[in-house]
Amino acid sequence: MKNPGRAVFVLACLAGASSLAHAGNVVTDDLSLDEGNVTALLEATSQRYVDAMHRLIEARYRDDYRAIRWEDLEISITRARVARFEYHYTANGADRTRVYHAMGGEPLSSLGGQIFEGPTRAGTPVSPDSPASMDEAEVFREPPAPTIDRVAADAADDALFSGFDDVDIRARILPTGNSVLQPFPIDGEDKALDPEFKLLRHIEHDIQNGIVPSGGRIQGAIGGNLCSSCRYAMKSLSNEYGIEVRVTQMFASLPRREQDALVQSGRAVLKGRLLVDARSERPLLAYDALNRARTAQVQQKLGPRAMGRTFKGMLWRNRSFRFKLDPPRLRRVSESPPDSSPLTANRDVEEPTPRCD
């Protein structure tokens, strides 16, 4: 799909998406098999955050670091869910759209500090401790959780991003004191850091500040499945501001009967636990296709070789994990000709977004 970062899509027309739940004006759709469109749009959102992290590392972390820190970087970025919501509304007699983008987790600057400034963690099952370096065999302790002003830190991170404007907006962590959206923790996780909650809160913030009117509709996509906290937040936003919400979520697996049918038909084969197309060997599930594309982004932009780095403390052969010095060129979902740009102008950006004064 050409220019996925700015395209406006209609989730109601997606093949492979089936209505899962109706809660007032809130509808959740499942997307199982990859149809390209939603996956490419989320990949474009992810690229914005990968590029921003690249700028952060280039600016603040120029030293050589142990290989395990680069491993932590890859894992942290690829596992952080991304989400993209479009808010459609009418202002001054014209139909308008604002596209909100978010990645889950702490502000990028805080994440970078944890990875490159915090204590080096011990080895993992895929990267066991090695006696090759005494420096690597330090005593590791979990540091106390730092107290940070997430709102201020995330606002300061604006300097790391490019390409956002009056139409494409990065959804930041915002205070919830005057919000009808109140996240609740699940399994000890702060759900205010979920990308979909950041998106909902930023849309509410824009309504409260007269940037967009209430009564619009949200069409969105999430690179994972919704939790109960964010479902409740969607319903709260819908009820308070008269907003229709329709969101597509992805799951990491198919029902066994559907998977078996695809394999028996000859369309699909299993490679380990991955369901792939029998001819192209590309992942069939949207969830897997997005993860593969995001892994390619990280390897090509944040990998040690891409950053021009060497490793501190031990020889590379003593480590064994996801990063490779010469990673294979993974084909992205949204591959486009060299003369195209994923961030070309949106049809709505020719004039500033009108306020609702």
Image (tube, rainbow, N blue to C red):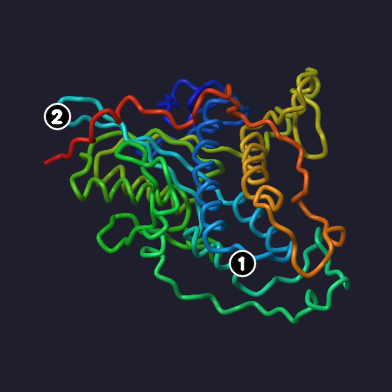
Q: Which residue in the structure is indicated by mark 1?
A: 116
Which quadrant holds the C terminus?
Answer: top left
> What residue is at 88 percent from the left and 73 percent from the top?
131
The spot of residue 33 in percent (x, y) is: 63, 27
The tag earlier along the polypeptide, 2 or 1, is: 2
Q: Compared with residue 39, is residue 339 higher up or lower down, i.e. above or below?
A: above
Query: How many marks do you count on the picture?
Result: 2
Residue at the extreme left of the image, as rendered: 357
Q: Amino acid at mark 1?
A: Phe
> What residue is at 58 percent from the left and 63 percent from the top?
61
Q: Is residue 354 left or right of residue 175?
A: left
The spot of residue 178 in percent (x, y) is: 25, 60
Q: Amino acid at mark 2?
A: Asn
Q: Compared with residue 264, is residue 209 higher up or lower down, i.e. above or below?
A: below
The disc placed on residue 92 is: 2
The disc placed on residue 9 is: none
The spot of residue 222 in percent (x, y) is: 50, 40
Q: How busy is the neighbourhood of tag 1: few (under 14 within 10 Å), some, or many (20 plus)?
A: many
